[in-house]
Image (cartoon, grey):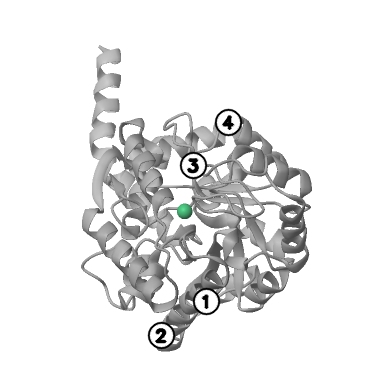
Amino acid sequence: MLKHLYIGLVLMSGVCGFGQNSDEAHRIQAGVLGVDTHNDTAQRVLIEKADIGQRLPDGMIDLPRLQEGSVHVPFFALWVPSYYPGAEAVRRTLDLRDAMQGVFDKYPDRIELATRARDIERIVAQKKIAAVLTIEGGHQIDDDLGVLRMYRRMGILSMTLTHFRSNNWADSSTGKPEHNGLTEFGRQVVREMNRIGMIVDISHVSDKTFYDVLEVTSKPVIASHSSCFVYSDVPRNMKDDMFRALAKNGGVVGVNFGSSFLSQADAEELKKHIAEQGQLAPNVTGADLDAFAAKEHAASNEAHPQVGNSTVDDAAQCIDHIVKVAGIDHVGIGSDFDGIPSVPKGLEDVSKMPNLTAALLKLGYSKRDIQKIMGGNFLRVVREVVGE
Ligand SMILES: [Zn+2]
């Protein structure tokens, strides 16, 4: 009798708890300092002239939805496709940097560039979005440390060492292995980034490059948008030994929300996309090259985004797995919004972040743990790398 009463109470609390859980999730999410270490929204700003000050009918990120989801510190990737050669990649990086400056200049009361932890805290306290800018692909420095240093002076806080293809000094997880990891110049790049207070990002690099970076770096590194290999065996995801090594370094991995990163059922979709990207070789320069990139961007918009086979619970599951393997201080959010071919149910855009907090509450996470996952851990890395 008592046992039945107990089961009845548990069932009732389960049913009623859904609303409570969601209310509590909204309350907790509203109080976090939210960091998301990767989005591809800068492509939309440059190519589509998307006005992210407005709530847009498409895409996954704009200023209203960032505020709704309490993602106060989005990392905007100034990504240049690997088919931009040498100096062309530098030119394209400057164009992306300029496009983002246009957003900062248009909405000075709502968004501001942040280049260190102190900026982030001040800007968020003023209820504005603290925008972080990043480089996505070491080819964008054109093998020149002077270019790297000037990127840092332009307010760029981190750099992903490769994109889909290996470059002249680092192997990519999805490119031909050409250097057995990092070359001597690649090691110099890592040391220089440590010295000038720029965060080394190991998403996209090959496993060997990852271990070479850990051998050289004197500062914590990040994986800005990678997920768990144990749940989806795409080469972009990280194995458990890598999570452990990253934890030893003091680094943090931002979980990628792409459905193909979270669910084996969608893994083939990403593998196909990577293979197609690897084939592109437009063989043009200047405005023709930009026109080619714009066409590629439009074609990818047309095909995506779709809702994949994963759900918000799969994102929570990958976070939970990393916590179990590496510890609560080494995981964060790296959505890859506006760059992923399909999204999980319940995490269709950045405004849906409270659903993830609800999923973490369901798994037993405390408010303090959720604050670390949602941004606290990445803020610590910014402070440790930049020094302020
Ligand atoms: Zn990427």
Q: Do the residues labelled 1 and 2 touch (CB within 8 Å)?
A: no
* Circle 1 residue: 91
**Residue type, label 2:** Tyr
Q: Which of marks 1 and 2 is in front?
A: 1
Quadrant of the image occupied by residue 48: bottom left
Compared with residue 328, is residue 285 higher up or lower down, i.e. above or below?
Answer: below
Q: Which of marks 2 and 4 is in front?
A: 4
**Residue type, label 1:** Arg
Residue 46: where, in percent of width, then height? 38, 75
Q: Which of marks 2 and 3 is in front?
A: 3
Quadrant in which the N terminus appears:
top left
Q: How crowded is mark 3: few (under 14 residues within 10 Å), some or many (20 or more)?
A: many
- Residue 147 lies left or right of residue 303; in this view the side is right
Regarding mark 2 in the picture, which secondary structure is present there? loop
CA–CA distance in space, label 1 to label 4: 38 Å
Quadrant of the image occupied by residue 114: bottom right
* Circle 3 residue: 236
